[in-house]
Amino acid sequence: MGTPCYVGATDPDQPTIVRARYVHFDGYPASLIPQLRGIWANTTRRDTTALIDAVLAHDWEYLGPDVIEGTHSFPDQHPVAGVGMTLDDSDPEPATVFPLSRAIDLAASWIYVINPADNTVMVHSGDGEPVGAHPLA
């Protein structure tokens, strides 16, 4: 069973608005925070803006820095090396945009907001309430 979540960043011009991508599997903080740290450290070479861009490129089955080209996938998915397995192989839909005050409408267990200013990830419960900040380093 998947543990759905959303991962993204706030809009610099509207800090109450989040632009995020759906992640279907392994959305618990104990799993997702280490995956984001691995992508940040290895794939994007500690560039938090590049991490945000990578995550916002697709909706995801799961995220993981250990994904390589040729990783086994279902027919409509494809691996993105060092980032994860896409949810489907079609042209990506636009990212989901929402105010944290309406996060409960997403029906996701967790919401992760990456902050490039201090290289942290703020974890929010499915109702948008903050539950903790985690450094990427």
Image (cartoon, rainbow, N blue to C red):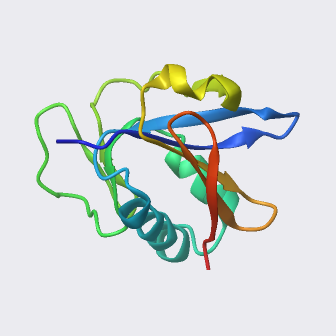
Coordinates of residue 85 in the picture (x, y in percent): 28, 48
Q: Residue at x 47, y 65 (%)?
A: 33
Task: Give the camera-side residue of 96 and 112.
Answer: 112
**Residue 85 visible at all:** yes
Q: Is residue 53 above or below residue 98?
A: below
Could you tell whether 47 is left or right of 82 in the image? right
Q: Is residue 135 above or below residue 115?
A: below
Q: Is residue 6 above or below residue 97?
A: below
Q: Residue at x 73, y 40 (%)?
A: 10
Q: Residue at x 53, y 25 (%)?
A: 104
Could you tell whether 97 is left or right of 70 in the image? right
Give the total of numbered labels: 0
Could you tell whether 17 is left or right of 95 in the image? right
Could you tell whether 30 is left or right of 3 in the image? right
Query: Hey, which quadrant is residue 8 in on the image?
Result: top right
- The residue positioned farthest toward the bottom in the image shown: 137
- The residue positioned farthest toward the right in the image shown: 13
Task: Give the camera-side residue of 76 and 36.
Answer: 36
Q: Quadrant of the N terminus?
A: top left
Query: Hey, which quadrant is residue 99 in on the image?
Result: top right
Coordinates of residue 118 in the picture (x, y in percent): 78, 67
Coordinates of residue 3 in the picture (x, y in percent): 30, 43
Q: Quadrant of the C terminus?
A: bottom right
Query: Hey, which quadrant is residue 84 in on the image?
Result: bottom left
Q: Residue at x 22, y 37 (%)?
A: 77
Coordinates of residue 53 in the picture (x, y in percent): 60, 48
**Residue 94 visible at all:** no
